[in-house]
């Protein structure tokens, strides 16, 4: 896979329409933050199976020469989302689809508002209408259905087809829209047009918010008008870990950003491994297991953490835990796994302002509910809550759910800035580690690092498999070595599998040159300004 270069800015995204929408803003003099708002709005229209404005998101924004700040745009459980209410309805777990799965406030547009304010504080002057122009056009005039949208709609049709509003937007005569056919979303176009005119806050406290609340009440979802009116995205400090290569940043709880940093922090303390060797893959998989054990023990709503997370990123814990990793034997597995469907996008402008961004509705098409007055697909992120009161992520009104989402960024010791990430639920920390190690530590060009065969320990994309899965392009001798070490290895039939996520990376050199690429497993790419 080729690496795209530029000196004037770059956007990478899993759909080229989103990458181009962002790059167009950069060409017109906008910042990376403004470009990402445009890309975020566009991807919500053209890639609706993976994200929507009825979901949540997280931003890492780094001004030139500074550490990034986080915009946490995830919403809490609604007022009606109580354990007692779900038990009375006969549920032992939170439903994955339908109105009772649409139980958390959508934070995505609140994140756009915070990002818009951040861009303004840096001198940004791009009007909202210009930022949303491409998204509105694609929704109103139509956009081509992607191959992955058709595939996932077919796979999940039985659980989606009868959800409120779904068939009217994403099916034709009861069947999935075919790849390449035109998909129009007129109500969503009207909603985006209203947000462009009235402001992003209208989603929560204006006409759009009133329409959303009415629709949610009509279908029986637990989120109320008051819940929407109370919501505001938050600015937070990132988590970070120091390695020999530089300082790595990621989002704090309720995301699994901690796990992503722990994997690379532990890898930094393992013996040097030859590129693409057993030692490289085995070491990263074993670091992943230790990171996931910590994640599943401590990551929840940041106001309800059972213990601080910062000690896990300090030298003492990392040194001790790395010393416990066997170079030859695998730790017994599995443990409980997480799911998720998401998009990651990155942008860097000519000044060096960088954005790592992730936006999601959790599972493909989220709850499956499409609100008729606004055309908004609502997330099912609250399906990650437990109905057991003693659980770490027990359901409670106002509580933030656990998020697989985690955008990544790194300031390297040699002066380079790296913004990178992926979708893929449980696979996100693993793919982040793979592309970081391959490019930063092993010197692979960006495009090759993303193209190279990947592995996945655990579940993603609605799959219950917890084995260590390898794409078929891996050396068979490596797969056998991993089996002998005790890994439960499954070699997939696919050379490039969606299961491995859709990754992207942009690297800014010391003199300002950019190198970037996005995953051949997706429908996207890199667009230079």
Image: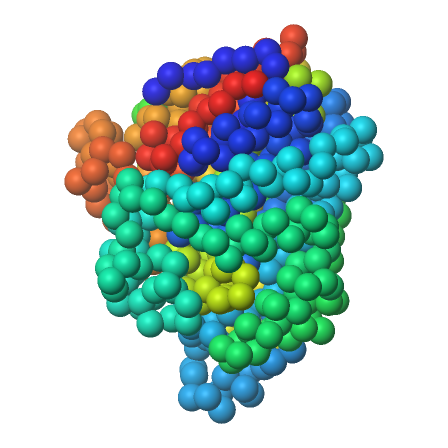
Instruction: Answer yes or no: is residue 105 visible.
Output: yes
Quadrant containing the N terminus is top left
Near-viewer residue (514 or 275): 514
Q: Could you tell whether 401 is left or right of 117 in the image?
A: left
Please, is residue 57 above or below residue 132 in the view? Answer: below
Q: Residue 56 location in percent, x, y? A: 57, 54
* Residue pictured at 61% horizontal, 14% vertical: 8
Near-viewer residue (472 or 279): 472
* Residue pictured at 60% horizontal, 74% vertical: 214
Q: Residue furthest top?
A: 511
* Residue pictured at 45% horizontal, 33% vertical: 17
Q: Could you tell whether 479 is left or right of 322 in the image?
A: left
Instruction: Answer yes or no: is residue 442 visible.
Output: no
Q: Quadrant of residue 172?
A: bottom left
Quadrant containing the C terminus is top right
Q: Quadrant of residue 273?
A: top left
* Residue pictured at 39% horizontal, 56% vertical: 364
Please, is residue 270 above or below residue 95 in the view? Answer: above
Q: Residue 23 location in percent, x, y? A: 56, 25
Q: Quadrant of residue 348?
A: top right
Near-viewer residue (507 or 238): 507
- Name the image colouring: rainbow
Q: Could you tell whether 211 is left or right of 472 in the image?
A: right
Q: How many marks?
A: 0
Q: Residue 65 location in percent, x, y? A: 75, 22
Q: Residue 268 location in percent, x, y? A: 53, 30
């Amino acid at each position: 896979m080729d690496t795209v270069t530029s000196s004037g800015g770059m956007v990478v995204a899993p759909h080229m329409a989103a990458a181009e929408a962002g790059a167009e803003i950069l060409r017109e003099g906008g910042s990376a933050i403004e470009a990402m708002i445009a890309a975020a709005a566009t991807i919500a229209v053209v890639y609706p199976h993976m994200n929507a404005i009825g979901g949540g998101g997280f931003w890492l924004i780094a001004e030139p020469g500074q550490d990034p700040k986080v915009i946490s745009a995830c919403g809490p459980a609604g007022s009606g989302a109580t354990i007692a209410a779900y038990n009375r309805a006969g549920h032992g777990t939170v439903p994955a689809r339908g109105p009772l799965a649409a139980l958390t406030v959508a934070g995505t547009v609140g994140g756009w508002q915070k990002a818009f304010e951040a861009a303004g504080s840096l001198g940004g002057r791009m009007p909202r209408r210009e930022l949303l122009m491409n998204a509105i056009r694609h929704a109103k005039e139509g956009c081509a259905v992607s191959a992955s949208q058709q595939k996932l709609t077919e796979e999940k049709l039985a659980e989606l087809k009868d959800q409120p509003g779904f068939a009217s937007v994403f099916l034709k005569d009861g069947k999935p829209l075919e790849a390449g056919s035109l998909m129009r979303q007129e109500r969503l176009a009207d909603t985006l047009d209203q947000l462009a005119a009235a402001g992003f806050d209208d989603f929560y406290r204006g006409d759009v918010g009133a329409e959303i609340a009415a629709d949610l009440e009509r279908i029986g979802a637990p989120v109320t008008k008051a819940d929407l009116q109370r919501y505001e995205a938050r600015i937070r400090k990132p988590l970070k870990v120091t390695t020999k290569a530089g300082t790595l940043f990621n989002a704090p709880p309720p995301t699994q950003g901690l796990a992503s940093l722990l994997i690379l922090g532990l890898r930094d303390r393992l013996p040097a491994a030859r590129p693409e060797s057993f030692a490289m893959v085995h070491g990263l998989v074993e670091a992943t297991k230790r990171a996931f054990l910590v994640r599943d023990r401590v990551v929840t709503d940041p106001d309800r953490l059972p213990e601080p997370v910062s000690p896990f990123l300090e030298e003492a814990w990392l040194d001790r835990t790395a010393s416990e990793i066997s170079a030859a034997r695998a730790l017994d597995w599995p443990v409980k796994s997480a799911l998720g469907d998401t998009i990651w996008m990155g942008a860097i402008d000519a000044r060096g302002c960088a954005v790592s961004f992730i936006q999601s509705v959790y599972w493909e098409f989220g709850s499956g509910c499409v609100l008729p007055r606004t055309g908004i697909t609502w997330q099912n992120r609250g399906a990650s809550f437990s109905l057991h009161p003693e659980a770490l992520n027990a359901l409670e009104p106002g509580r933030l759910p656990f998020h697989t989402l985690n955008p990544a960024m790194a300031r390297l010791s040699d002066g380079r800035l790296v913004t990178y990430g992926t979708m893929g639920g449980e696979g996100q920390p693993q793919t982040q580690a793979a592309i970081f190690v391959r490019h930063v530590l092993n010197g692979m060009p960006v495009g090759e690092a993303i193209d190279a065969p990947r592995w996945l320990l655990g579940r993603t994309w609605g799959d219950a498999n917890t084995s260590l899965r390898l794409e078929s392009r891996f050396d068979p001798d490596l797969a056998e070595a991993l089996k002998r070490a005790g890994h439960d290895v499954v070699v997939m039939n696919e050379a490039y599998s969606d299961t491995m996520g859709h990754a992207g990376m942009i690297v800014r050199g010391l003199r300002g040159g950019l190198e970037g690429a996005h995953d051949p497993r997706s429908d996207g790419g890199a667009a230079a300004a």
